[in-house]
Amino acid sequence: MRVFLVGGTGFVGRALVALLLEQGHTPVVLARRPRDLPPGAVFLRGDITREVPDLEGVEAAIYLAGIIREREETFRAVHVEGVRNLLVALKRAGVGRLLHMSALGARRGTPSRYYETKAEGEALVRESSLSYAIFRPSLIFGPGDEFFGKVLKGLVCSPLPFIPLLGDGGFPFRPIYVGDVAQAFVKALEGGLEGTFDLVGPREYTFRELLALVMQVVGREKPFLPIPLSLLDRVVPFLSRLPFAPLTQDQYAMLKEGNTAPFPPPAHLLPRLTPLEEVLPGYLRC
């Protein structure tokens, strides 16, 4: 199957492109730069936030594009306008199938613009006449991830003699492996699955437990220094205006909320969920 991908050079995209090729499909990857796409993948230069691509010869599309911090691009451009442009392209080309990656927690009426715009993107997909599947993953882990490989590792491996902890660190998360996310997309593509699905891992952790696990994996031991949320509520809005803020207001709002769901994906979609403890030791080092 010839499959058009937006976000195919990103963290999830690289895993998905590799799996599509392994399963005999041809990924057509829209990106501004090729970024060492594997043999067999087709590179198409473009920017989905600014143009409507030509999808002639494509049989299905996957939208993975997403940002967690606004820099050159805005949440609205990537999560809403990009989806809108892809839907126009699909209609012009007569392509009737779209798989869309949203986020667990995406909804209207939250203090997070990330969640707000992800919800708007979901609404555009649902209101289209396409056959669609929407996936809403929790934190995604694996080699090259941002949360474990940069944020938590940065806290644990810093020269500080303690680890700053947001409040009591009790916010719940249920991380899922990037390979499992890619597998869910491929199974849905091949099986014609439709609907909206939460993608979560096999176990729920608190933020504090995740930090303790990272410490164990990298061989560090430090005490936690809890920082009251009442103080962070005042400080984070100011710090988030700085160009290299360690935590934005949007990320802070999402962290306090946690990111979990009570039920795992359907067994026919992911018969085995990969444990966090099985993967972290393979790529986390101080």
Image: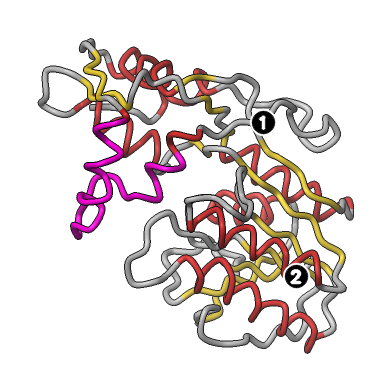
* Residue located beneath label 2 in the image: 2
Q: Position of residue 169 (x, y in %)?
A: 38, 21
73 left or right of 37 in image = left
Q: Which mark is residue 286?
A: none
Give the crowd class for mark 2: few <14, some 14-19, many >=20 residues within 10 Å: some
Q: Nearer the viewer, residue 56 or 201?
A: 201
133 left or right of 157 in image = right
Which segment did they paint magenta? 230-254
Q: Taking 99 as reference, is 224 above or below it?
A: above
Query: Residue placed at 39% from the left, 18% from the top?
Result: 208
The number of discs equals 2
Amino acid type assigned to the residue bearing label 1 in the image: Ala
How is the rendered protein coloured? secondary structure
Q: Taking 81 as reference, is 56 above or below it?
A: below
Q: Secondary structure at mark 1?
A: loop
How far separated are the C-alphas under marks 2 and 1?
33 Å
257 left or right of 153 in image = right
Query: Residue placed at 60% from the left, 67% from the top?
Result: 41
Q: Position of residue 142 (x, y in %)?
A: 48, 36
Q: Taking 123 as reference, is 284 above or below it?
A: above
User: Which quadrant: the C terminus?
Assistant: top left
* Residue located beneath label 1 in the image: 261
Residue 231 within the segment the image draws in magenta = yes
